[in-house]
Each structure stands twice: as structure tokens, then as C-alpha cells.
Amino acid sequence: MYSYISGIVKDQESNYVVLDNNGIGYHIFVANPFQYNINDEAKIYIYDYIREDEHSLYGFSTKAEKDLFLRLLNVKGVGPKLIMPMLATGSVNGIIDAIDRENILYLKKFPKVGDKVARQIILDLKGKLTSVSDNAPSIGGFDELVSVLEGLGYKTSDIKKVLPNIDNSLKIEDQVKEALKLMLK
């Protein structure tokens, strides 16, 4: 079992990156491959998925993302190919919040997640993800973003509503763009 792999990103496609570590190229499925730049060094947390007909590596930019993946993987009817698009389009805190609030509509916005799967995820995980969310970026991790949005005239209460849906690993410019999109909805 691997914990993480560090190396140089050599290739990227729509759902994976190739990470070179000491001359070995690891084909790693990731939620957002374009967050990595070719020829840059990266550290990717790994889950080694082994089944009768498949042996794949799934990668994550944070431990919280990996922990959420592992929890979702234990839900009946949920596999890696369903989870990765969830992580690509939703934030860790946003997904956890949706599960805890039983927000089926939020979960159904993800590809291949229907009513039955959303209800199963909520049934299996509601109230059990506090340890995962403790590792996820806190509101305090968005101090700069909050001050920028307050400077633009937004209320703190409105800002806090959109923070769970914003990826903390993004650059501040991208966080502001994402927050503004969410605020204007």
C-alpha cells in the first residue's frame, strides 16, 4: 500500500497524470489533473485500488480528499469512477456538509449519482465524517479570500455560505473567481 508518491509530472490527460519517480512513470487517476503542471514536482497521496480485473492508482492533492474518498468507497454501490467526478466538481467540505444536512439535490448534481445512490451515501455516512472534515481546510484557511470579498462589499454571513464549496488549494485569484460565481447564483 502506498501513502504518497513524489515526483515530476510528465503527462496529463482529462482524468489522470503520469508522475515520474526515479525513472518509473506512475499512471495516477486524479480528480483535477490540470491542477498539476507538466515538468513540475508534485506530491500526490495515493490509494492503490486492486480488484480481480483492475489494478489502478487513484491520487489526491490532500489527505482530507483521500480520507473522504476512502469513506465514500465503503458505501454500497459507490466506486472510484463515481467518486472522482464528485471530488473534481465539489469541495471536501461541500460534500461533507451536503451529507450531514441530507442535501440530496447537491449530491445528485454529480455525474452518475441518482436519488438511490445519494440516499445510500447519506444513510451510510451522515454524522460519521467529522474526523475527515477536521483535516479539511477550515474557514480560517480562507482569511485572505474573506477579506477580499468583504472589501468588495459582501456580507460575512453570505461569504461563509459559499466557502465550503471552494477548493482551498486554488490560488487566491481563482478562489475569488469561484466565490464570485457562487455568490451571483
Image: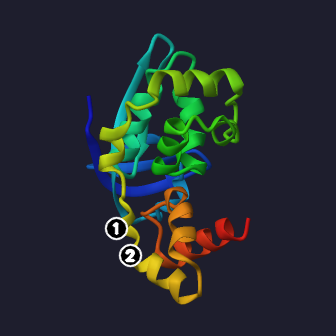
Taking depth in this image into account, of 39 and 66 the one nearest to the observer is: 66
Q: How many marks?
A: 2
89 shown above or below 141: above
Q: Can residue 177 be seen in this view?
A: yes
Q: Where is residue 98 in the image (x, y as percent from the top left)?
A: 55, 41
Left or right of 26, for residue 81: right
Q: Where is residue 19 in the image (x, y as percent from the top left)?
A: 39, 50
Placement of the C terminus among the 4 image quadrants = bottom right
Name the residue beneath numbered marker 1.
140
Residue located at (70% from left, 26% from top): 115
Q: Which amino acid does label 1 sit on?
A: Gly
Q: How crowded is mark 1: few (under 14 residues within 10 Å), some or many (20 or more)?
A: few
Q: How is the image coloured?
A: rainbow
Residue located at (60% from left, 41% from top): 85
142 shown above or below 107: below
181 shown above or below 23: below
Q: Position of residue 152 (x, y in %)?
A: 58, 87
Q: Is mark 1 on a helix, strand or loop?
A: helix
Residue located at (62% from left, 49% from top): 14
Tags 2 and 1 in contact by the CB under 8 Å rule?
Answer: yes
Residue located at (43% from left, 63% from top): 168
Q: What element carries label 2?
A: helix
Taking depth in this image into account, of 78 and 5 the one nearest to the observer is: 78
**Residue at the limit of the structure toward the top, as seen here:** 52
Q: What residue type is labelled 2?
A: Asp
Placement of the N terminus among the 4 image quadrants = top left
Left or right of 100, for residue 43: left
Disc 2/disc 1 C-alpha distance (Å): 5 Å
As drawn, the label of residue 150 is: none
Name the residue beneath numbered marker 2.
143
Q: Can residue 30 be seen in this view?
A: no
